[in-house]
Image: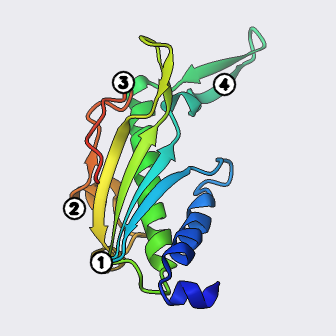
Amino acid sequence: KERDYLGSDQSALADYWTRVLEKPVDPQQLSSFRNLGYSETDKRLVMQYALPPISLFPTIEQVKYLPTPNVLQEIQLSPSRLERLYVDVLLKTTLAVLFRLFQSDSADALKSVAFNGTVTVMDRGTGHYKSPCVIAIEVEKAAFLGINLAEVDPLACFKGLKGTISANLVELDPISPIN
């Protein structure tokens, strides 16, 4: 398998990237990998990655003990703070997935990766699940590996790489995926 992978065998590459992508970025999260397509000519990987919906995020910012009535009072996150945290998680997840793919590319089979992040939710209007693309970016390996991820602001980095993110993540306004 290693020989096939290092020789850029299509099947071995797909198997390897599938194994890399099946490992969740967050240990508490299930595998988020959906599918991928590869162009050997361009050394370009196009992938779809499932991101968590905002409904899975905690909404309690803190809990205070009030001794007089002897109760715990929950203080909710404001909607704007919750959305900022959600955007931050989606951006960091996207950058982490790209880093994993490029960093693990010992076969040098990747020149670029197109990442399409989707969120699966119930469409209350139809009663069916939908998975709109809400974040998309295509980046060259050389440009990405030149970034010091430990020091960047995720949003500034994402914008600098010409990524696109939904203007309204709470309502999941879709954007065009990269093909």
Q: Would you name the residue on which mark 4 appears?
A: 64
Residue 92 image point, x, y percent: 44, 55
Give neighbour class at mark 2: few <14, some 14-19, many 20+ (Cα, 10 Å): few
Counting residues from the start of the chain, the first of labels 2 and 3 encountered is 2
Q: CA distance from mark 2 to mark 3?
A: 25 Å
Camera-near label (3 vs 1) is 1
Counting residues from the start of the chain, the first of labels 3 and 1 encountered is 1
Q: Would you name the residue on which mark 3 appears?
A: 171
Q: Would you name the residue on which mark 1 appears?
A: 41
Residue 84 image point, x, y percent: 39, 38
Give neighbour class at mark 3: few <14, some 14-19, many 20+ (Cα, 10 Å): few
Q: Nearer the viewer, residue 75 or 132?
A: 132
Q: Amino acid at mark 4?
A: Lys
Residue 19 image point, x, y percent: 62, 66
Q: Amino acid at mark 1?
A: Thr
State the quadrant of the C terminus: bottom left
Residue 156 in the image: above or below residue 61: below
Q: Secondary structure at mark 4?
A: strand
Q: CA distance from mark 1 to mark 4?
A: 59 Å
Counting residues from the start of the chain, the first of labels 3 and 4 encountered is 4
Q: Is residue 154 left or right of residue 106?
A: left
Counting residues from the start of the chain, the first of labels 4 and 2 encountered is 4
Which residue is located at x 61 percent, y 53 percent? 26
